[in-house]
Amino acid sequence: MTAPLRLLVVEDEQNLASGLKLNLELEGFEVDLAASAREAMARLVQPEAYAAILLDVMLPDLDGFELCGRLREAGNYTPVLMLTAKSSAADRVHGLEVGADDYLSKPFELSELLARVHSLLRRQQWDRSRPTSETADELRFGEAIIHFDTQEVRVRGESLKLTRLEFDLLRYFSQNPNRVLGREELMENVWKLANYPNSRTVDNFILRMRKCFEPDPREPVYFVAVRGSGYKFDPEGRGDD
Ligand code: CA
């Protein structure tokens, strides 16, 4: 028998927090609660302590976006499901930009919450169990080497930290070299979002890719914009046609 997976629920509304804990325990998880960002940070000192984090946005000390961003900056890539009363598309995208893996608006159905937690954990399991021999788990272009299995990135000999979404974007590009990829296609396949609210999310990620990988981010040769269509990844670095 495998040990139960441990989840961290960061939620300051006590009734909701204990309701979530109860239901997640019934589902077979072990659950710890944190009522503030500070408490959550203290529990997250060990990066591998939790299988996933359910993170409320409106917390008394720090908001959930900020907390998620700080975790990612600190190199903690535990899957995060953001929970919030804010349901606007802009907030949803903001959550994903700071490194959340999924997003659920309050009020939510328990069944949907459980489905999303399971899908988050499945996806993580899938990422970890990908056989390295059968898939192109390494990407090399220019002076960059990306190991998708160990999430190690080196550019010009320097190591670099990327978020999970940045890895997913790179992976999608590497699977589709020299093909023009529309923002919509990228949002659907990388962010797993249909009907995304604005294309700036994709553009912001491309800017970051260029900053990380291009010899001159203002004259990109690997992550090339195709006017009116989207972006193209050219591992040969030939730039504009
Ligand atoms: Ca709250």
Image (cartoon, rainbow, N blue to C red):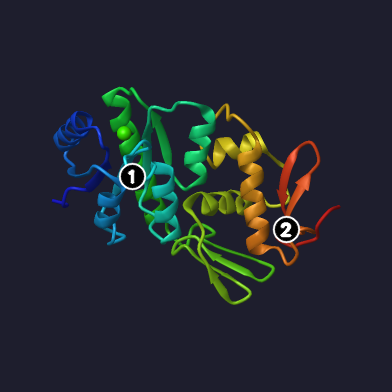
- Left or right: where 199 falls relative to 85: right
Seen at 54% across and 32% down, the residue is 90
Kindly report the distance in space between the C-alpha atoms of the residues bearing marks 2 and 1.
41 Å
**Pointer 2 and pointer 1: residues touching (CB < 8 Å)?**
no
Residue shown at 28% from the left, 50% from the top: 40
Residue 52 pos. (x, y %): 31, 47
Q: Is residue 24 above or below residue 72?
A: above
Image location of residue 64, percent across then percent down: 38, 42
Question: Disc 1, ligand 1: is the CB inside 8 Å?
Answer: no
| Disc 2 element | loop
Is residue 224 among what the camera can see?
yes
What residue is shown with label 1?
61
Ligand 1 closer than 8 Å to label 2 CB:
no
First of labels 2, 1 by sequence position: 1
Residue furthest to the right in view is 241
Spot the residue most to the bottom: 157
Instruction: Name the amino acid, label 2.
Output: Tyr
Res 193 seen here? no
- The residue that label 2 is drawn on is 222
| Between marks 2 and 1 in the image, the one whose residue lies nearer the viewer | 1
Quarter of the image for residue 108 reads: top left
Quarter of the rendering containing residue 104: top left
Q: In the drawing, does residue 171 fall left or right of residue 71?
A: right
- Picture coordinates of residue 84, whole percent (x, y): 38, 31
Residue visible at 41% across and 52% down in the picture: 127
Whether residue 74 is situated above or below residue 26 in the rendered picture: below
Q: Which mark is residue 190?
A: none
Give the amino acid at mark 1: Asp
Q: List x then y, in percent, for residue 83.
A: 36, 34
User: Considering depth in this image, is 149 or 227 the residue closer to the camera?
Assistant: 227
